[in-house]
């Protein structure tokens, strides 16, 4: 059974930093893409960043230059380093994993990030 365990959310002042982690386990297949999405109250879930098995990355325009996604293949873990945080970054952040042999995407339970002004 696939499990995604997220950690690292919390409350931070504007301009501060947080680092999110998501560790995946339970599948016999290797991982293709790992990513982070977020959902603010009253808004749709949106892609923040993702990273392929080859290391290619995509970022939302709103976080470019401030957030960095990385992964540790040996640990099946993806990280999101968030710097220069803004109040508009406040949301629940969800980890997402796409396995090569699985037929669906997997989601973490979500971790709250709150940025105060």
Image: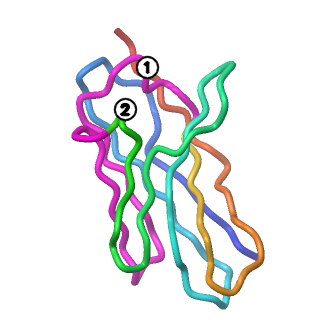
Q: Which residues are magenta?
A: 64-92
In which quadrant will I find the C terminus?
top left
Determine if the magenta segment contains residue 84: yes
Q: Is residue 54 above or below residue 42?
A: below
Give x and y (percent) for residue 113.
48, 31
Could you tell me if the residues under marks 1 and 2 are in contact, i.e. CB atoms within 8 Å? yes
Query: What residue did someone put label 1 on?
Result: 88
Give x and y (percent) for residue 14.
29, 18
Q: Tell me the distance, in whole angstroms, between the alpha carbons under discs 1 and 2.
A: 10 Å
Mark positioned earlier in the residue sequence (1 or 2): 2
Give x and y (percent) for residue 116.
39, 13
Q: Is residue 82 left or right of residue 112?
A: left
**Label 1 crowd (10 A; few <14 / some 14-19 / many >=20):** few
* Residue sitting at the far top: 117
- Where, by quadrant of the figure, is residue 86 drawn? top left
From the viewer's side, name the closer residue of 84 and 100: 100
The residue lying at 34 percent from left, 56 percent from top is: 69
Give x and y (percent) for residue 62.
37, 32
Which type of secondary structure does the marked residue at label 2 adopt? Answer: helix
Determine if the magenta segment contains residue 32: no
Q: Label for residue 62?
A: 2
In which quadrant will I find the N terminus?
bottom right
- Where, by quadrant of the figure, is residue 96 drawn? bottom right
């Amino acid at each position: 059974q696939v499990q995604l365990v997220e950690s690292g959310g919390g409350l931070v002042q504007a301009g501060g930093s947080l680092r999110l982690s998501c560790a995946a386990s339970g599948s016999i297949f290797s991982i293709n893409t790992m990513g982070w999405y977020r959902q603010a109250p009253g808004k749709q879930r949106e892609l923040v960043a993702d990273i392929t098995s080859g290391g290619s990355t995509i970022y939302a325009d709103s976080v470019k230059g401030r957030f960095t996604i990385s992964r540790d293949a040996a640990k099946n873990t993806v990280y999101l380093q968030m710097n220069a945080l803004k109040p508009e970054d406040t949301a629940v952040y969800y980890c997402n994993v796409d396995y090569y042999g699985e037929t669906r995407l997997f989601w973490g339970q979500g971790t709250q990030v709150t940025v105060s002004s």
